[in-house]
Amino acid sequence: MTHPHRTDTLRPSPTLIRPIPFESVAPRPVPGWRKIRVLVDGRADGTVPGFSLAAGGLELPANFRGDPQQHPDSDTVLLFTTGGPVLTYHGEDLRFWSVQWPGDLLTIPRGTPYVVDVLSEHLGSTGYVVRSTSSLLDGNLARPDLDDQAAAMAGAAREHWENRAPAPGRCTAVPFTSVAPVVTPQGHRIRPLVDGEPGGNTPGMRLSVGGLDVPGAFLAHPHHHPGTDVLVLPTECPAEGALTLHGQQLEHDAVQYSGDLLPIPAGREFAHTVQNLSLTEPIGRVYEFRSQPSVLCDNPRLPGLLPIAERRGRAALDRLHGVDAVTAHLRAANPVHARLSGTGARP
């Protein structure tokens, strides 16, 4: 996809936080998948050294069926963003199965054998795989003993899947809108789509996923995650993009577009906030993967950075849209706040 603002005037970040576009990494062989774009790899020689999550880009053709595999020490989340429904067979004898539509998440707990199957009558599927360990290239256990069972499951399920209820087993399919949002201290309305806490919807998972909708001109409260690595993925981003300000004093910036991954390491030095660079269009369907069991913890705010965030966020809007247009929009959207502060929209 071509983004008209990909080379905007915002200076690129010299730090570890930088967007990783889907097509910026060439596909390479990965067990179980044939090939994956290894986008986020936390090994010493990987794309994000020291990062505790791994992520890859999937481009699966019609009639693709992966090889049976499992990850003994790694929890997995699958997300498909385009294409038709994808079937996944899982469990010790692959007798359970799940259906994913674009936008749905599928959680696969560590140690669970699985096979992904793309229906032949569709054009294929594109998406992402995220795991709770630092590399997609490690911790892959092939299960050739399940090849015959995978073929048998595919033969039955492909013919009758529309008329049979899925059998979820230990895996959980989570549509984006199936979980109600809660308001975080940062002002986001986040959907705890994958929550591994004992009372969550996927107990025992070591990684979590939140779903966000970011309104036009929205500016989040600055915050950080002391013990949590975070991976941000917007799948429905306006042409202007999403601006992340980050650093000890929010001195750095990074602009994301649809499909870009943004790894944010744990720690105060990676304080951050997000500014929607569109005045009117929301950043829809943002997925936030975290290295802890829940997105509802480890999110302390940094109120001392709010004036910097407001000044830099407003400056970015002014550069893109013009001072008069931004002022008029913010005054119409929030007359009292715009009159008092002249900054971007906040709750």
Image (cartoon, grey):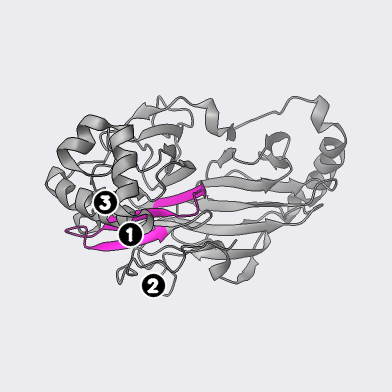
Q: Which residues are magenta?
A: 231-255
The secondary element bearing badge 3 is classed as helix
Q: Which residue is mark 3?
A: 314
Q: CA distance from mark 1 to mark 3?
A: 9 Å
Front position in the image: 325 or 310:
325
Q: Is residue 219 visible?
A: no
In screen coordinates, is 149 left or right of 333? right
State the residue position of label 1: 319
Label 3 vs label 2: CA separation? 37 Å
The residue under the point 80% across, 47% down is: 122
* Type of the residue with mark 2: Ala
Residue 128 visible here? yes
Which of the two discs, 2 and 1, sits closer to the camera? 1
The type of residue carrying mark 1 is Arg
Q: Earlier in the sequence, mark 2 or mark 1?
A: 2
Q: Residues within 10 Å of mark 3 (few under 14, many from 20)?
A: many
* Cβ atoms under marks 3 and 2 closer than 8 Å: no
Is residue 251 one of those drawn in magenta? yes
Outermost residue toward the bottom? 45
Q: Nearer the viewer, mark 3 or mark 2?
A: 3
Q: Mark 2: few, some, or many residues within 10 Å (few <14, many ≥20)?
A: few
Residue 252 % position (x, y): 26, 63
Residue type at mark 3 is: Arg
Q: Position of residue 267 (x, y in %)?
A: 23, 55
- Identify whether 94 is placed above or below 143: above
Identify residue for label 2: 44
Mark before the other along the chain sequence, 3 or 2: 2
Q: CA distance from mark 2 to mark 1?
A: 38 Å
Question: Where is residue 224 drawn, in percent x and y?
Answer: 24, 48
Q: Is residue 224 left or right of residue 256?
A: left
**Quarter of the figure with the C terminus:** top left
